[in-house]
């Protein structure tokens, strides 16, 4: 899937890719796959609110900061 995203980013002269609702391991795999194409993983859009702060507790937020 990331190879397809990389192809689209390159075709439209982009520099970054993004994902949605990826957990830590999926996000790391996407990051690695895009990096092989010279593309940065810029975002992982997750459900986050005052009522749902799971990403703070499961390590996803910390991984994003890295």
Image: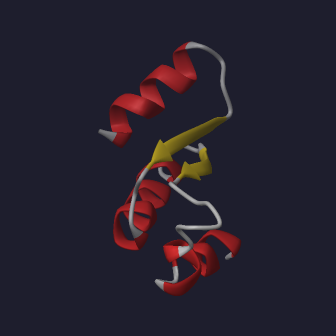
Q: Position of residue 35 (x, y in %)?
A: 53, 53
Quadrant for the C terminus in the image: bottom right
In the current view of this chain or complex, which residue is farthest to the left?
A: 1
**Residue 49, position in %: x, y?**
62, 60
Q: How many marks?
A: 0
Question: In the image, is residue 53 above or below residue 4?
Answer: below
Q: Is residue 16 above or below residue 65?
A: above
Depth check: give the residue in front, 54 or 34: 54
**Residue 15, image quadrant:** top right
Q: Position of residue 16 (x, y in %)?
A: 64, 38
Residue at the image point whose x is 57% and y is 38% from the top: 17
Query: What is the basis of the colouring in this image?
Result: secondary structure
Residue 52 at x, y percent in the picture? 52, 67
Q: Quadrant of residue 61?
A: bottom right
Location of the N terminus by quadrant is top left
| Left or right: 6, with 66 as reference point | left
Rendered view: 19 above or below 31: above
Q: Residue furthest top?
A: 12
């Amino acid at each position: 899937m990331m190879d397809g995203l990389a192809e689209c980013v390159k075709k439209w002269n982009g520099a970054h890719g993004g994902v949605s609702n990826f957990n830590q391991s999926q996000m790391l795999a996407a990051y690695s796959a895009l990096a092989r194409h010279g593309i940065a993983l810029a975002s992982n859009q997750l459900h986050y609110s005052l009522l749902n702060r799971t990403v703070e507790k499961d390590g996803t937020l910390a991984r994003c900061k890295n």
